[in-house]
Amino acid sequence: MLRKILIANRGEIAVRIIRACKELGIKSAAIYSEADRTSLHTSMADESYLIGAAPSSESYLNKNKIIALAKEIKADAIHPGYGYFSENADFIETVEKEGIVFIGPSSDSVKKMGNKTAARQLMKKNNVPIVPGTTEPVKSVEKGIKTAKEVGYPILLKAAAGGGGKGMRKISSDKEFADAFEATKREAMKAFANDSIYIEKYIENPRHIEVQVIADKHGNYAHLFERECSIQRRHQKIIEEAPSSFVDPETRNKITQAGVNAAKACNYFNAGTIEFLMDKNKSFYFLEMNTRLQVEHPVTELISGIDLVKEQISIASGNRLSFKQKDLFINGHALESRIYAEDAENNFLPSTGKLNEYEIPSGPGIRVDSGFSRGSDISIYYDPLIAKLVCWSSTRKEAISRMIRALKEFRISGVTNNIPFLLEVFVNQNFINGNFDINFIEKEELVKKFQSEKTDEDNTLEEIASAFSAILKHQPALHKHAGKKFENSNKWTDLEYE
């Protein structure tokens, strides 16, 4: 077993890894930037080291400093978490050459899956279904239009090195192609330093289903079932669940086997995720592979009973998987909400400040993964994720009820947060019935409805303030809102008038 692990990350995922290390009796070494001097991960680790200034480019993305520090403190391994260097093949290769264990896949596997066109070629060769389109970059507008006609509009132009919804455009006709082609190439170059783009058939109203795979260095592979990640805003996941209510046992067997086949195709080891698009007929197509631990891994842990971070560390230590596929089964249902410091009423702009109040929910089936505590600063420099609220119960219906209760219990002040918006999703009848796809938020016009409701609430509260002012002036006839209770305690204090 490893003796000391350097955690090349911050926030909730760093805390998650530190806790796993403590339970395994392994020393944890945290890195922190100037902005994170007082962060939770900095104080929780056995050792903490200042790595640089607040901007990520000078701290958490400073490859040379991180590797030099790992050698200096005699760390056996580096755990990258997710984001930052977790899928950077050059970083992984350097770590490997320095004789340090990288807790994740090999640099070779990451290279094979990092380029989307190369990955599509590999999947096609290994009988993993791919979305119709090109497996080579599109070099010109003329060739692109010819391919688009063959595939059939609408199509997507996508960055070969892309992800997270960047470098992607939907095109519905020839006349849109030229402008979209140039714009997508520019965006791809700016975001990924690579302007290669390819064509995929646009799948109408798909669901986003992903398969958690895991493998050791001895050739043992397994899957931990699927996750439903269709509730997205601007191509970013905000709610995930496991298992998917849409996937029946027969489809589950097919898609999980395809996930394992995809991992075998690139000689993968450690934890990884194969992402698929699934249409209304339950046909599914390979989208991409995330060669790292996913943000939403807790929902899989809760239904499978497997601690993925501990398993990652064990695999990196050279051990075999601690379980066999036949030993795994789905136990209950789990949901995850990403709690962001963002203003849903103001185009979801990030919110910064100090967490003056931070009280997390608790009770049966509740898990909160967070990198913050009361008094913590939410910085302008990093992702605005405050916490992941995860709820488990024996059924999906009960898990939703538990999530609604837990969201209402969450107390945050000092920064604006997205809890009220998340509640709009969980009380939506189509969501409750499992009737949704990746366009759910747009179809249900949840942003518009939410902002409209908030505006009405703001006006009502202004009326209440005026009423109280009138009462103080001995004008009791104006207190028409007596007896009304406001339940959005995440933005306003609970008020009850007698």
Image: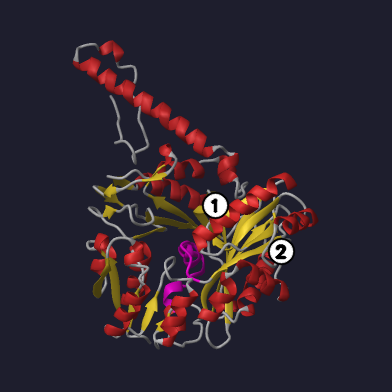
Task: Mark 1 or mark 2: name the one nearer the start of the chain.
Answer: 2
Image position, residue 448 (x, y; %): 51, 34
Say if residue 305 shows up in the picture. Answer: yes
Query: Looking at the picture, how far across and down is residue 488, in whole percent?
Result: 37, 37
Secondary element type, mark 1:
loop
Q: Nearer the viewer, residue 296 or 179?
A: 179
193 inside magenta stretch: no
| Camera-nearest residue between 383 and 147 | 147
Judged left or right of residue 297, residue 42 is: left
**Amino acid tagged 1:** His
Which residue does the numbered mark 2 point to in the structure image? 134
Q: Which residues are magenta?
A: 292-312
Residue 482 occupies which quadrant of the picture?
top left
Give the image quarter of residue 343: top left
Marks 1 and 2 sit apart, C-alpha to C-alpha, by 22 Å
Task: Determine the image quadrant of residue 251.
Answer: bottom right
Q: Position of residue 317 (x, y in %)?
A: 43, 86
**Residue 347 at x, y percent in the picture:** 44, 40
Question: Could you tell me if residue 333 is visible in this image?
Answer: no
Helix, strand or loop for the magenta stretch, by majority:
helix
